[in-house]
Amino acid sequence: MYPGNLLMERKRSVSYTYNLISALKWYWIFSLVQRTSSQEYAHSIRVEGDIILGGLFPVHSRGERGVPCGDLKKEKGIHRLEAMMYAIDQINKDPDLLANITLGVRILDTCSRDTYALEQSLTFVQALIDKDASDVRCANGDPPIFTKPDKISGVIGAAASSVSIMVANILRLFKIPQISYASTAPELSDNTRYDFFSRVVPPDSYQAQAMVDIVTALGWNYVSTLASEGNYGESGVEAFTQISREIGGVCIAQSLKIPREPKAGEFDKIIRRLLETPQARAIIIFANEDDIRRILEAAKRNNQTGHFLWIGSDSWGSKIAPVFQQEEIAEGAVTILPKRASIDGFDRYFRSRSLANNRRNVWFAEFWEENFGCKLGSHGKRNSHFKKCTGLEKIGRDSSFEQEGKVQFVIDAVYSMAHALNNMHRDLCPGYIGLCPRMKTSDGKELLSYIRAVHFNGSAGTPVTYNENGDAPGRYDIYQYQIVNKTTEYKVIGQWTNQLHLNVGDMQWRSREHIQPSSVCSLPCKPGERKKQVKGVPCCWNCERCEGYHYQVDEITCDLCPLDQKPNANHTGCQLIPIIKLEWHSPWAVVPVFISILGIVATSFVIVTFVRYNDTPIVRASGRELSYVLLTGIFLCYAITFLMIGTPDMVVCSLRRIFLGLGMCFSYAALLTKTNRIHRIFEQGKKSVTAPKFISPASQLVITFSLISIQLIGVFIWFIVDPPHIIVDYGEQRTPDPENARGVLKCDISELSLICSLGYSILLMVTCTVYAIKTRGVPETFNEAKPIGFTMYTTCIIWLAFIPIFFGTAQSAERMYIQTTTLTVSMSLSASVSLGMLYMPKVYIIIFHPEQNVQKRKRSFKAVVTAATMQSKLIQKGNDRPNGEVKTEICESLETNTSSTKTTYVSYSNHAN
């Protein structure tokens, strides 16, 4: 429902009781009755007729210093008054409208003052008041003779809303219908208080709706309002405020009021107040002409030309007076005016008026003087400095003439009354010529029902109708005050008929503003920013960026993207995070792969050499079977690099689980078996010459593969509990900057699983290191215990460095690269240490010094153990005694076991049990 039905409740200073008492003050009635006929009609127009219509027009302005009336109003007063007279003439001539019935008028001057209009309107109710004159006698004792007052069937007027409200309170008591041609206050739509009031102009609630639509269409949401004190201004602003609040999207920065009697500097103060909210450039004005002109003057004085964007109500409309000499400050102002048209018939009528043919208008002589700037004889109101009127002047020829804007509505109001009377006559007096008794005795309530039911095309060709509240439909023209080539004009830029039709392309702003100006509290947020509302001001907000992995859901909400997505460039949506893996061409992969390739080549060379020289003393002395197992483990340690860098899939992930710890397990299981064997041999030798058990090659292989099987069983259990699969880890490279976020394609091997997989191999490595320490005293002549020891010491150092590097980079964005490279390089270095310390010296002898790869003599287990034991004891003594004392013992003890200067590789493998 449109706001024509909006009821604007306001307290009035004059209550119904006061109005009733005022209406019944008998001294008023009797004073009016006692006047002479000339006095009675000296300030009113009276035209006889079968039906009399009252008229209320602001013929004069408000007087000052206690004087009720001021200067003559040529347009708003005389033009509108003559429009009623013109309409009455046209109706009386129309054979199809109120045939054989003549309309008369009783027109009064309101002097633009509500209290004065109230007194004048008592004239309309005289005929309806029964006068008790039983106690009144003339001087000669005869009863008085009262002049019968005219019965007013209906009233046309008033103009100002405040006047109509005051008069409506009187007329409703006596059930006299009233039709206004200019009152637009929303308060008058209250059918419970102003039930006999109707109007041919739309109420300000429609106008306020149109103004809200204009503001919204221009993209403005932060405005200030300015109203003249009184019903029109305050009601208009109240309607605008309420509609904007109901619709939403428009906020009121300030709501200021212009006093009825403004003090000096009041308008400058208002401008300064408006500048306190500089973002609210749009100013909604419901004010009278004088106030509009003075506020524009104040804005000009304060050098605010071009700052304010004026939205004026119909009181501004397309009038020249408010903008006269204020053209630049008013440029771009958007104003609204009820849709109207110039009535050509009235123009011809008014131009033909003269002093001779218009004696019925008691104010016409005053208008004549004002219009032509002359003086009518000695009784004229102008002083002697003016020229004397000839009476031959002509309107439109000797003076300018432009039809006043509300003339159309005055004519439509009179015709509304005539059509209602015509329809009423047709129903109450069928076939009766003239007024029938039934119609003469009808009351205003019956006529009101016919007024509300009229429907006809008005003087401008537009339909004239009323709703249940007596309001006319809203039809407005939208104007903009423009300056084109130094010529000013009000240009029609749109219209409003229940909805806005605005031609934004026809709008023109100040020449310095090439784009449409704005009046907003806060600029729209950029894409990817959300609005954080300022408390209490829904049109004001701060813009906050959707940070990190958040994206803009709507104007006020940021939400987190799903785990596998990141915000797009402007944070208005989410996009999939790119998935990466360790590429072969990456520097993090090139180095480990290069080391692995060298290691695989070197390992393959050693294996081939050992196979080629499988039966030579060096190969046999190193323990061929365990050497091949150890070399296999070294080869696997190098080969695991390719599985760790390869693209993860089910096969690769399965192989990673199997071989991640298997290579190290092969290596350290073989080394542990070797060191344990050496330790047991020489420990046994200290006690007896009997060889310990399980030192044969077959036994060593069984022990080694038993240790390896534990690793394989653990892997098998791992496969059952947690089958291998690939995952995309979006948390690993979830950087603070979403632009750098990546998903890492990887096998689902957790750090705990990795520790468990490598943990067994590390346990073997640590155990092997312990045995290496225990066998450090065994002479290098007899076995490779010392190289194994050095190998294990170095390996422990490598893995001690690996742990902080691997686990210390768990939070790094380069985690995948660092950990993979660290793990593969550590395993390759471990394999390289074993290969270099245990086998490269042997290969060097085999290839470059084959003369040393010979067996000098075969020694029994007993001889080997005895020699090793003796040498251990001598070394211990050498540590306890001075250097000179031990030499003799060494020579004596080793007299029979002196070795040659060349190294002799002793084999005792055939002495096993």
Image (spheres, grey):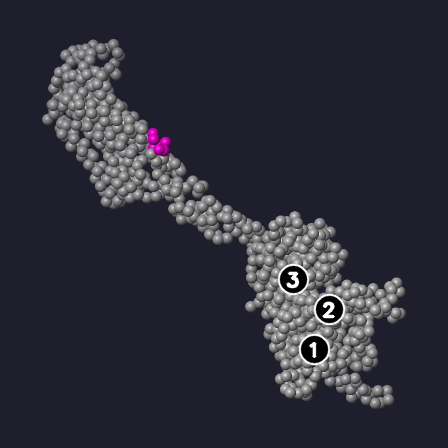
Q: Amino acid at mark 2?
A: Asp
Q: Amino acid at mark 1?
A: Ile
Disc 3 residue crowd, few under 14, some 14–19, many 20+, Cα 10 Å? many
- The residue closer to the viewer here, 603 or 722, is 603
Q: Quadrant of residue 455?
A: bottom right
Q: Is residue 533 above or below residue 393?
A: above
Q: Visible in this render: residue 231?
A: no
Residue 691, percent across and down?
A: 13, 25
Alpha carbons under labels 1 and 3: distance apart? 31 Å
- The residue closer to the viewer here, 153 or 760, is 153
Alpha carbons under labels 2 and 3: distance apart? 24 Å
Q: Are marks 2 and 3 in contact (CB under 8 Å)?
A: no
Q: Residue at x 29, y 33 (%)?
A: 641
Q: Name the mark on residue 347.
A: 2
Residue 881, percent across and down?
A: 25, 14
> What residue did someone put label 1 on?
91
Q: Is residue 28 left or right of residue 763?
A: right
Which mark sits nearer the N-terminus, 2 or 3? 3
Of the two numbered discs 1 and 3 in the rendering, the one whose residue sits closer to the viewer:
1
Q: Quadrant of residue 298?
A: bottom right
> What residue did someone put label 3 on?
336
Answer whether residue 492 is magenta in the image: no
Disc 2 residue crowd, few under 14, some 14–19, many 20+, Cα 10 Å? some
Q: Magenta stretch: give its range.
A: 585-591
Question: Which image quadrant: the N terminus?
Answer: bottom right
